[in-house]
């Protein structure tokens, strides 16, 4: 089958976007965490952050042109891309896709479906949690009466939220901090869904396989090995 | 097949009920949040609230008549309608149904099942959460020793409850406020069930499709794209 | 097929045990909640509690005899019955079974499987939660430094625990109170599993049905109606 | 089929490793909990701890040799074994496997798949929770400003975390204590996934069986009996 220009662009550009996403996240992290760094380093980080964002914007524009759609329609049909362009800290959702695109053209050994889902869910949630903890830290640490004053606090809060445990020994106090926390909660719900759904479908599969074999010879339980 | 009078009523009246539900919620919200509004505006809101409720009551009565059932039996067999009539803030559950009824007669493109379930769950939970936060705010803000004193607090509390995270930095202190919170918890459990169940069944489906294709050509992971 | 004596005993005795369980729970509740009641009433409650327990013990003994097993083996193979005999507040688990036994011989209309699972899970969890809140209240209300001092507090705490939200504005402080809370948590996990699992299997079923029908005619979403 | 030397080693060594794991956990527990024990007893415990660890290291080395792989590759392909070697408190994950290996060669009655999954999940989570509560207690009890000062507190905290309830009346304050708590949260998520997934697949199975039988004769609900 012939490949559309859009599909070819997405294929070639996947790795570039992935690198830009990691650069964005890394430079943002250095700027947020490095209070004591020289101003020159922090300015460099800001430059890298903006350069990465420019790559995202360029990619968005090229894809709009290649899709042949008008702006209003493209913004609507690619709403997830639009959201991710406006809030680049949500980029990690796309890193997985970039990896998938690259991987699909290597023809290397692919993980089994269940392992893949868990791996992708784990990587996405880890990256989103990292981005969320940075944003929370930046937002909360200078607020009056804040609980979350060190980056360690922000990481701990993010972990308790992602697992939907939520002790509440620390909690954001600013409206924006709470909004970020709600985003992290949504990731936590999705993670829970991924873990539970994967387990459930894996069990059903093992069960179906056991049903086909003669009894007394059930290797099902060993499928859980690494 | 010929359509029963009851089915025809429900079909024609679906949009009317949906609009009335939104008016009810909107006027209730304005009245609860608008402390500083002129008395005339607040009285108007109260009038809209009661008018919407009258529409609900009328619809309930007409459906009882069209169903040909006696009152006690109708109240019992339509217990969900009865609950929703008495507690109109739970109406959002029905908005989804109204949308469904209208949509079913447009023959437009329908979302895939999984997207539909997530969309419906999201819309219902958002609307119920909005109604719950309003009711909580109205109930708690004047209670002595209350944590939840601004509407922002009520929204934050509702979000932590819906995701079953529950930090507990804020908590209702009045019995009625706690009852409302328990209702919000039930919505949270249902949301969790919807997210997890959807993920699980989607995974099983992708898996079944992968099993039918030759290996090395597994586009399953790209099904998650928007 | 001929019915074993044990099966016949369980069939005839199901309703008796169900009534005894409700009496046990009711008399326990009156005794715990009724501080101000006359001593005679409280003594009567204690008598009813013990009488109910005697019924449980008698049933346990008769079933051991009818099963033809020796004591150590019976205790081991019927461990759930043994646990429930020692901790009669866990009886509600069995009320569902009693209802099932009675229902199975009425040949009345049976609920669909999904509705049945949700109904049973709801009834069991409500009864267990009620029993748990009573036990917690009795245990905690007189402890020094306790948070849970009114029965309303105990109910609120139980609800937050069953939904796995867990605000922590109130928490038990005695070791026994914490043990009871852990039991309530286990019920909460089971409830979550029931809700999620039911939703997931219902979705899969709707999906399988949709796959069999021609597109454009998908009534799946209306299966969720009461 | 002929058995590889590695498989034979794992088969014969399974029970030895299981005993060593229990000894490790037991001696660690005695050392952590027994502040008041004579120094000789505590030294003995330390010796047992180290001896158990030596058994783990030896097993790891022998398996590397039998696998015929070079060190870097073996470490990578057996990453779970490597993690468990470095953090022996995570051993309980392996106890289940040892039990499985032993059981597989006894040809005794095997539990049904669903009961097996719940049993394994329960045993693993109980042992991991025990190990986690010991580590938390050791880490937190001497920290300034710590909430978790008795072993009972550590157990209570671990239970609230495993059920993802998370009251937050107690919370770790040291970075290492929080890291341990994050590990416990991960176990909690996995437990939730196991419970929900098992319930979901059990329901689907009951449903499939009901669909095959004539109506009015549905023994599905009694499958839930112990």
Image (cartoon, coloured by chain):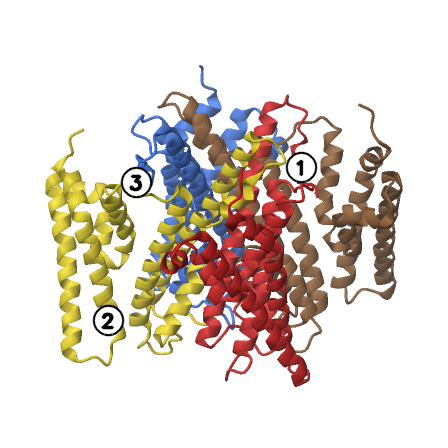
Chain colours: A red, B yellow, C blue, D brown
Residue at 35% across, 50% down? B120
Residue D31 or D125: which is nearer the viewer? Answer: D125
Of helix, strand and loop, which one carries label 2? helix
Find residue D163 and report its horizontal and vertical position in percent.
55, 55
Q: Which residue is mark 2?
A: B30
Residue A182 or D192: which is nearer the viewer? Answer: A182
**Dot 3 and dot 1 within a common chain:** no
Find residue A136 and report its horizontal and vertical position in percent.
54, 72
Pointer 2 and pointer 1: residues touching (CB < 8 Å)? no
Decide: few, some or many residues near mark 2? Use Cα within 10 Å; few <14, some 14-19, many ≥20.
some
Q: Mark number for residue C222?
A: 3
- Measured in 3D between alpha carbons, the distance from the residue under mark 3 to the one under mark 2, in whole angstroms, is 33 Å
Is residue B27 toward the left or the right of residue D22 in the image?
Answer: left
Q: Quadrant of residue A40?
A: bottom right
Decide: few, some or many residues near mark 3? Use Cα within 10 Å; few <14, some 14-19, many ≥20.
few
Pointer 3 and pointer 2: residues touching (CB < 8 Å)? no
Of helix, strand and loop, which one carries label 3? helix
Q: Mark number for residue A223?
A: 1
Q: Chain ID for label 3?
A: C
């Amino acid at each position: 089958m012939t490949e559309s220009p859009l599909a070819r662009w997405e294929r070639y550009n996947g790795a570039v976007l992935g690198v830009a996403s990691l650069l964005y996240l890394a430079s943002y992290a250095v700027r947020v965490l490095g209070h004591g760094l020289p101003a020159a380093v922090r300015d460099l980080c800001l430059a890298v952050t903006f350069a990465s964002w420019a790559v995202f914007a360029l990619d968005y524009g090229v894809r709009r042109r290649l899709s042949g759609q008008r702006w209003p329609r493209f913004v609507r049909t690619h709403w997830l891309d639009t959201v991710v362009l406006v809030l680049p800290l949500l980029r990690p959702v796309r890193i997985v896709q970039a990896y998938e695109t690259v991987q699909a053209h290597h023809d290397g050994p692919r993980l089994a479906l269940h392992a893949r889902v868990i791996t992708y869910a784990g990587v996405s949630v880890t990256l989103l949690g990292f981005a969320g903890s940075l944003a929370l830290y930046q937002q909360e640490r200078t607020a009056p009466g804040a609980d979350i004053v060190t980056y360690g606090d922000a990481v701990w809060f993010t972990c308790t939220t992602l697992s939907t445990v939520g002790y509440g020994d620390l909690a954001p106090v600013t409206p924006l901090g709470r909004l970020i926390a709600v985003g992290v909660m949504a990731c936590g719900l999705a993670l829970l869904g991924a873990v539970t759904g994967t387990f459930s479908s894996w069990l059903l599969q093992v069960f179906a396989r056991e049903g086909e074999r003669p009894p007394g010879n059930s290797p099902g339980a060993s499928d859980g090995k690494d």
